Every structure is written in structure tokens, then in C-alpha cells.
Image (tube, rainbow, N blue to C red):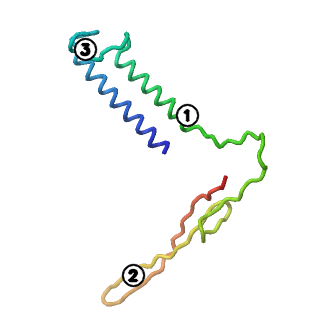
Amino acid sequence: MKKSLLITLITAAMAMSANAQQTGEAGAGAGAGGAGGVGGALGGLGAAGIAGGVIAAAVVGSVIASNDTNTDTGTGGGGENPDPECSAGDDLVDGICYNVTNTLTTTNTNGVTTTITVPVTTTYLPTVPQ
């Protein structure tokens, strides 16, 4: 979620930058405020300044969204640490969940069928209930 928000904000900033460059080229010179200078400046603030403000706001919003709100300040709570949990049927060994499944591979060569069982082990971190 956080990465997709950041990618969206970067894409929007790049699009606004390209838009600012296009409107800057449309004028007849620096500070053109005639018919060709639509939206070129807002109270002395140019398109580049507006785009910079939007980028800064996007960065601040991303930092706020990435803030870890699950920090323990040590000011309360029951003091018990809940046990980590794995999915049903998986083993928890040394803080890592293990899942072993068997994959069958069947080969038919010259009328001879060979079946091989291959154990596939997957590992993942357990979830900790809050």
C-alpha cells in the first residue's frame, strides 16, 4: 500500500512537471500574461513553484503514511508478548514457519513411466497477533 502510494505520487509529480514545461513554452517570453499565458503565474508564483509545492506535499504525505504507529513507548499494557502464529498445519521452528509439500513429477519415456516425489519446503515469517 505504501509503495503504491509513493509510486502514484511520483508519477503525478512527473506529469505535473511535464505539464509545467509545456505551459512555459507556450508563452511569448518570460512572464507572458497575455492570451497565450493562461495559468502561467498565480500571484507571482510560477508553474515550477506550484509543481515544487505539490512534490513537497507528496513527500510529506508519504513520510506521514510510512510512520510506524505500532511503537511501544513502555507506558502501559499487559506486558505479555503474544506468541507468533503460523498458518494451519505449518511448523514454527526458531521463529520461522515451515511448510513442506510434495510435488509429483511424472515422466513417460519409451513406454516407461517414472514418478518422482519432490519435497518442496517454503519458509515465511509468522504473524504476531496484536
Question: Disc 2 marks which amino acid?
Answer: Thr
Residue located beneath label 1 in the image: 64
Residue drawn at point x = 50 percent, y = 34 percent: 62
* Helix, strand or loop at mark 1: helix
* Helix, strand or loop at mark 2: strand
Q: Mark 1 or mark 2: which comes first in sequence?
A: 1
Give the class, few, some or many, for how many residues have Cα within 10 Å of label 2's Cα (few <14, many ≥20): few
* Residue 39, position as x, y percentages in the image: 30, 17
Question: Disc 1 marks which amino acid?
Answer: Ile
Residue drawn at point x = 32 percent, y = 85 percent: 109
Residue drawn at point x = 63 percent, y = 61 percent: 96
* Residue 111, position as x, y percentages in the image: 31, 90
Residue located beneath label 2 in the image: 106
Q: Mark 3 or mark 2: which comes first in sequence?
A: 3
* Residue 106, position as x, y percentages in the image: 39, 81
Residue located beneath label 3 in the image: 37
Indicate which label's residue lies in the foreground, 1 or 2.
1
Question: Disc 3 marks which amino acid?
Answer: Gly
| Discs 3, 2 touching: Cβ within 8 Å | no
Relative to the observer, which residue lies in front, 123 or 19? 19
Residue drawn at point x = 77 percent, y = 46 percent: 77
In the image, residue 129 above or below residue 90: above
